[in-house]
Image (cartoon, coloured by chain):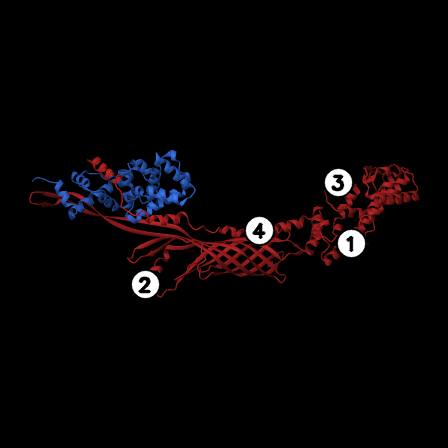
């Protein structure tokens, strides 16, 4: 309750363009935004840029913020996501409407993923092509439907599915390749044992 | 299983926090949120606009002044010529009035409508003169009386005349007295200086009394006088006032010839204000000052990504036109050069796709692992960035011109310099970094004063056509060379050929 009141005060001050309030609000939400940005960006520097852009837009358009329509964190998150795919939307790089690639579930890979820590998953996600990365994040992490993703990115739902399948397949391949290189072999061996 | 893996990823990532220094971004954020306030450049344009408004206001004021408000410091030569024109008209009017009044008197006497002998009329007239001079300062009730005068063939049947007389004298003097009084009242008016000797007739003097001559009907004025007032309008230019008489003459449907005379006689104010704009094709000229050949190659390799689109210019100028035909003008100008940044790049990434085949089997002491075979797939991507880059220049032009008269039109050649006092550049640039990769730089330079070479050139031709009395509209063809829009190792100028149009307001009539 106190935090809510505090945020209200901060927002009111931010609307007056008071730097102290802007700074405080930024410090309050920066970590949360960075944890999202790191998944959408290809590296930490791009993620920082994304966070900065997000807060910049937020402070510039704070007059439009209506607390009755949603929490501040959700609003910031939405700005960040919009910002991350704006470039790709503009350049139509996601306008791919190929056949959906069948997703074969491999228990071995699932097991491997389960063994991975968040940092490792993020590293893998960051290696995805940006289009695939955005869709993977939107679908798997944020939980949007393909229809919603299609509307956001101005692509068809089918294209979204295709990109997601591709992303998954790439992740799978990366895991497999890593395994073959022995990066995860120790953990992997423990889980995937086949008796002869 | 699918849901499990996705849920696993979601849970792991949702609770994940990044270890980073968030203070890093604060400085950049602060700068972006509270940039040093841009100087409102548009305010510079208020100055010439103010000049323009003052000029127009002045001109408008002089055009609408009443003749009595003006001083007599008019050009003597103009007045002399005016006097000659007016003298002729005045004589004509005088004759008409004398004849008319003579006829009226005769008619009155002849018809015995008012039977008063001529000496008595004269006596009455003298009395009126005396009484009037005595009572000039008194406030008395005045009565408007219409007189119906029996007409003959020349005066027509009725000539309604109106005058203001004192009511105590109306009963004794009669209609003829009123006619005489009209005459006397008119005589008391002071005619304009130049024509005092020539204006002997009472009719004309009465005409002079009614200074606000115009063609609108005045119900209370005699139709005869109305007629005279119209025919005598150029006569009103007898006065020392050029502009108002010109205007009045126009109002009263004076002939075009009369207008021309007056227009020709009017001097033109040498000061004028110009509002103009032009747009045209532009070519970029870029040279490098560095001797480092490898660096030059990197820059020159990217020449193709930027191509100039247009150069537009608007300007507000205050000018002085000398009678010799030479003119000088200066003011404020805004230039905009737009370029298209068009960049395309292709890149590839390689992914390993699994084959449903076992590639090899790792057999440890106890465990055996099947590793799936993979195939390599190369994905090719392409991206295109199209962006409009803009150079904005705020300059003070100083231009010298020479004017050739071509009938009513004028051809003006101009040459001048543009001193740039503010410059702004927004856009993208492409360069190749040390590793050989293309980098796109986003530039958004604040308005700055940093240009090393600030002088641009301007050469042009203007074709002016008159509008209204002394103003002109014009079309122009111009060549412009911008100053160097970069500082440092790059010299970058733009050369433009443009077509434009504008309006030139002469500030006010020169007398």
First reached walking from the N terminus: tag 3 or tag 4: 4
Q: Residue B36 carries which label?
A: none
Q: Which chain carries label 1?
A: B
| Residue A101 image position (x, y, % from top left) | 23, 40
For label 3, the crowd category at 10 Å Cα-Cα, with few meaning under 14, some 14 to 19 and many 20 or more, is few
Instruction: Quarter of the image for the N terminus of chain B: give it.
Output: top left
Q: Nearer the viewer, mark 1 or mark 2?
A: 1
Q: Mark 4 points at which residue?
A: B50
Residues beneath discs 3 and 4 located on the same chain: yes
First reached walking from the N terminus: tag 2 or tag 4: 4
* Numbered disc 2: secondary structure: helix
| Residue A103 image position (x, y, % from top left) | 21, 38
Q: Mark 1 points at which residue?
A: B193
Residue at the bottom extreme of this rendering: B291
Residue at mark 1 to residue at mark 2: CA–CA distance: 87 Å
Q: Which of marks 1 and 4 is in front?
A: 4
Residue at mark 2 to residue at mark 4: CA–CA distance: 53 Å
* Numbered disc 1: secondary structure: helix
First reached walking from the N terminus: tag 1 or tag 4: 4
Q: Which chain carries label 3?
A: B
Q: Which mark is residue B294?
A: 2
For chain B, what colour was chosen? red
| Residue A162 image position (x, y, % from top left) | 26, 40
Instruction: Quarter of the image for the C terminus of chain B: give it.
Output: bottom right
Q: Which of B99 and B321 is in front in this view?
A: B321
* Numbered disc 4: secondary structure: helix
Q: Which mark is residue B218?
A: 3
In the rendered structure, the answer to whether residue A139 lies left or right of residue B107 reads left
């Amino acid at each position: 309750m106190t935090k809510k009141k505090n945020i209200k005060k901060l927002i009111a001050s931010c609307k007056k363009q008071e730097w102290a309030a802007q700074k405080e609000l930024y410090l309050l939400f920066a970590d949360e935004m960075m944890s999202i940005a790191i998944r959408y960006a290809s590296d930490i520097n791009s993620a920082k840029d994304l966070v900065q852009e997000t807060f910049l837009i937020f402070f510039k358009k704070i007059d439009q913020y209506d607390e009755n329509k949603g929490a501040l964190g959700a609003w910031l998150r939405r700005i960040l996501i919009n910002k991350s795919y704006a470039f790709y939307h503009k350049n139509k790089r996601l306008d791919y409407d190929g056949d959906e690639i069948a997703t074969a579930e491999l228990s071995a890979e699932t097991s491997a993923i389960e063994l991975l820590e968040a940092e490792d998953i993020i590293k893998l996600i960051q290696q995805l092509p940006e289009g695939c990365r955005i869709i993977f994040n939107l679908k798997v992490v944020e939980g949007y439907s393909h229809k919603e993703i299609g509307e956001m990115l101005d692509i068809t739902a089918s294209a979204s599915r295709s990109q997601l399948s591709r992303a998954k397949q790439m992740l799978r391949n990366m895991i497999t390749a890593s395994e073959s290189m022995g990066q995860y072999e120790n953990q992997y061996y423990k889980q995937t044992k086949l008796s002869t | 299983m699918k849901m499990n893996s996705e849920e696993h990823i979601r849970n792991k990532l949702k609770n994940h926090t990044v270890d980073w220094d968030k203070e890093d971004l604060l400085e950049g954020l602060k700068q972006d949120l509270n940039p040093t306030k841009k100087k409102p450049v548009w305010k510079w344009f208020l100055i010439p606009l103010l000049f323009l408004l003052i000029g127009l206001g002045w001109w408008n004021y002089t055009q609408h002044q009443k003749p009595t408000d003006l001083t007599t410091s008019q050009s003597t030569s103009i007045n002399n010529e005016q006097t000659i024109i007016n003298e002729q008209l005045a004589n004509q009017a005088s004759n008409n009035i004398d004849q008319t009044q003579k006829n009226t008197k005769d008619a009155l006497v002849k018809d015995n409508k008012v039977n008063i002998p001529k000496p008595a009329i004269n006596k009455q007239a003298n009395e009126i003169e005396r009484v009037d001079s005595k009572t000039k300062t008194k406030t008395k009730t005045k009565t408007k009386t219409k007189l119906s005068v029996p007409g003959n063939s020349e005066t027509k049947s009725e000539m309604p005349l109106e005058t203001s007389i004192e009511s105590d004298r109306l009963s004794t003097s009669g209609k003829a007295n009123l006619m005489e009084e009209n005459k006397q009242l008119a005589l008391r008016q002071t005619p304009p200086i130049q024509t005092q000797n020539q204006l002997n007739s009472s009719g004309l003097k009465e005409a002079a009394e009614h200074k606000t001559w115009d063609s609108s009907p005045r119900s209370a004025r005699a139709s005869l006088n109305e007629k005279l007032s119209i025919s005598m309008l150029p006569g009103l230019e007898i006065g020392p006032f050029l502009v108002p008489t010109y205007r009045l003459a126009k109002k009263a449907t004076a002939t075009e010839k009369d207008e021309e005379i007056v227009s020709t006689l009017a001097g033109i104010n040498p000061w004028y204000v110009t509002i103009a704009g032009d747009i045209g094709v532009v070519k970029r000229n870029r040279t490098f000052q560095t001797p480092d050949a490898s660096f030059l190659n990197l820059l020159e390799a990217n020449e193709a990504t930027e191509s100039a689109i247009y150069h537009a210019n608007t300007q507000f100028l205050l000018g002085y036109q000398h009678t010799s035909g030479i003119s000088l003008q200066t003011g404020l100008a805004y230039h905009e050069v737009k370029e298209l940044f068009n960049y395309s790049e292709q890149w590839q990434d390689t992914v390993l796709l699994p084959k449903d085949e076992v590639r090899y089997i790792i057999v440890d002491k106890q465990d055996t692992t099947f590793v799936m075979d993979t195939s390599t797939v190369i994905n090719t991507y392409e991206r295109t960035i199209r962006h409009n880059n803009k150079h904005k220049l705020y300059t003070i032009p100083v231009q010298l011109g020479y004017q050739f008269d071509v009938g009513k039109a004028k051809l003006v050649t101009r040459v001048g310099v543009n001193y740039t006092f503010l410059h702004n550049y927004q856009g993208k640039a492409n360069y190749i970094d040390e590793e050989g990769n293309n980098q796109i730089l986003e530039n958004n330079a604040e308005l700055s004063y940093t240009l090393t070479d600030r002088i641009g050139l301007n050469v042009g031709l203007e074709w002016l056509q008159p509008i209204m009395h002394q103003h002109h509209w014009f079309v122009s063809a111009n060549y412009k060379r911008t100053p160097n829009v970069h500082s440092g190792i790059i010299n970058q100028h733009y050369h433009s050929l443009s077509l434009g149009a504008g309006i030139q307001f002469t500030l006010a009539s020169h007398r």
